[in-house]
Amino acid sequence: MMANATDIAFAPMLPWWLLGAAAAAALAAAGLAFARGASGATLRLLLSALLVAALARPTLVSELREPERDVAVVAVDRSDSQRTGVRTRMTDEALDALESRFDFLPRVDLLVVETAGGGTGEPNRGTALLGALREAWAAVPRRQRAGAFVITDGLVHDATASPSGPGEMGPVHVLLTGDPERDGDRRLSVTAAPAYGIVGKDVEIELVVEDLGPEGAGRGGALVSVSADGRPLKAVGVSLGRAERIALPVEHAGNTIFEFGVEEGPRELSLTNNRAVVTVNGVRDRLKVLLVSGRPHAGERVWRNLLKSDPAVDLIHFTILRPPYKQDATPIRELALISFPVRELFEERLEEFDLVVFDRYARRGVIPQLYLANVADYVRGGGALLDAAGPAFASKVTTLHESALSDVYPGAPTGSILTGPFRPVPTEVGRRHPVTGPLVAGSAEPRWGRWLRQIDVERERGHTLMSGAEGRPLLLVDRVGEGRVGQLASDQVWLWARGFQGGGPHAELLRRLAHWLMKEPDLEEDALTARMAGGRLEVERRKAEADPEPVTALAPDGRTLDVELRPTGAGRWRGAVEADTVGVWQVRAGEKTAIAGVAVDNPLEFEDLRPTATRLAPVAEATGGRLLWLGTDAVPDLRQVRPGGRMSGRGWLGLRDNRAYRVIGIERTPLLPGWLVLALAALLLAWLWRREGQRG
């Protein structure tokens, strides 16, 4: 509805100070004339006043005004803490009641904003409700801001930054959900946990279990269950309110996911904070490698340099220069050789080694068959064996294949030695295997340097990762029992180290091969891994031989989700699903399983789930608003109050009545037009002239 408003405005022809000086001079002259009793003083005063008024140019301004509607904002807390108990229902009912109250305020628009807490890239932000309120007000002109309502349980984490003063936005009324007299909760929190642990040793994780009620923290004890990688580990009794340290074993390299759960308490708002997930990355302290070399050759130093350059490897290296039965005339006191500690290495200390390497070793009676059988048993029990074959491997007399090791070798010698230049190339399986796949980086045919000799072997088991002369197997790997075996059918890798014909990736090949044999998790060729990133469960499937099976994800609450995988090259497939449930997620692909732990996305939100008025009471007081509990008070009526008035009372809440408007038209009418000024001035002058004439 339009409205008219009139006012008088001035547009002086002279500066106000000059106009004021003229008026003062005219007034002084008139006063002097009155004091002397001069004739016509009144007419002179009227004429002066007319001239001053004409110079001020008074104008009647008529405005056509369009009223603007006031705006009230309702900020609704939809964070995780608001989903506990009956708070969601109370929130919805309060919002419906407010919306119905605004039906009786036709000149006020309602703007509803909701916040879920946290935010992208801010996983521990808490509930930034007042920040959402500020953002909503940014789009509303200040002259239209009538006030705000906040529906929340009081668990707001930006309350220290007050949204604005009452002059900026009007009163802020806080409507609190929950029951402060009855709501209580039990929570479990991890207060200290290491990121890494040594394989085979324990790590200590510190946690606290608390019972929080209206009267404060409870006392007593509780039972905490612990699982590792989804497998129940043990149950531990803890005292409420005290930090307890629990020792847990790190049994393998890579991530170990520990999940802690505490039994339900006497009062519970949510079971979400009764669980906690900790990921500990298991690392090996030191890797012990036994390198046994045959007769000295050019490639021996390649193996030694590679293993010595790795700071995580403790290397024990023996070179067999001659068998013990060989005699010469050199006096014993002048010999620089030591006897080979066969019994100590291959019986007493064999299990201490993570990897045993035979470099061009030939059977010459140094290591008896009994000890070679120990090596075979060591492999089956979880050890690692790598054989870099030399010409002796082709002979039935000196080959290690004619020993107890024949049961673990993936390739058997044919008795032939292939000589002449050839280029090692990855096989189809090798292009997808983590040992050799990354070496080719998708190239069609690597142009590495050639080798000059290869021992011909026939693959009996395992996988051929590289082929050499005449397409024959060059690098073979296999899993035997709990252990692994690698077989390199050539002693020419040193040519790559010397840069012959451009060389090749000898260091990376041998490093990846050695660490695959020692069960490095990142080099598993048939692996299923899962991890959490940005609220999503990311799954990777590695498989060297065939396409992967269907993958499913099992949520902590029992739901099953299908994971769609897409190939990413080099025998890898990846996929992801949304992970919206706290706890341990399990991923399955055929017989393979993997787990990933989801911690609470917003830990601040679950620190204390009890509703509170303490955080928002200062905001309501500072802005002239009111704070009330929805559990005991119904949503009051709403009133519009002029600025400066009281904004709440018994049974009602106030909104500022700004009565804002927008001017859509202006009409200006001069009060002293020129013709009128001239006419009045002429009349006064004529009158004054007549008075003066009569007096004369």
Image: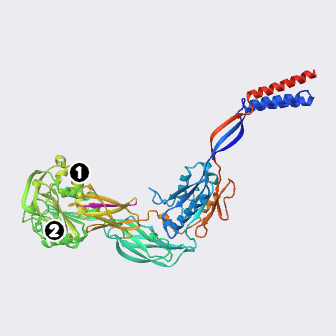
- Please give the residue where the numbered disc 2 appears in the rendered image: 408
Report the side of 447 relative to 554 (left or right): left
Q: Which mark is residue 49?
A: none
Alpha-carbon neighbours of circle 2 within 10 Å: few (<14), some, or many (≥20)?
many
Mark 2 or 1, closer to the camera: 1
Magenta stretch in the rendered image: 535-543
- Please give the residue where the numbered disc 1 appears in the rendered image: 442
Q: Which image quarter holds the C terminus?
A: top right
Residue 606 screen position, x and y as percent: 48, 66
Mark 2 is on which residue type?
Val
For the question of whether residue 336 can be seen, the reply is no
Report the side of 637 relative to 114 (left or right): right
Figure disc tally: 2
How far is mark 2 from mark 1, CA to CA?
32 Å
Report the side of 221 relative to 331 (left or right): right
Q: Is residue 248 above or below residue 124?
A: below
623 or 39: nearer the viewer? 39
**Coloring applied to the structure:** rainbow
Magenta span contains residue 672: no
Q: Is residue 533 above or below residue 496?
A: below
Mark 1 is on which residue type?
Gly
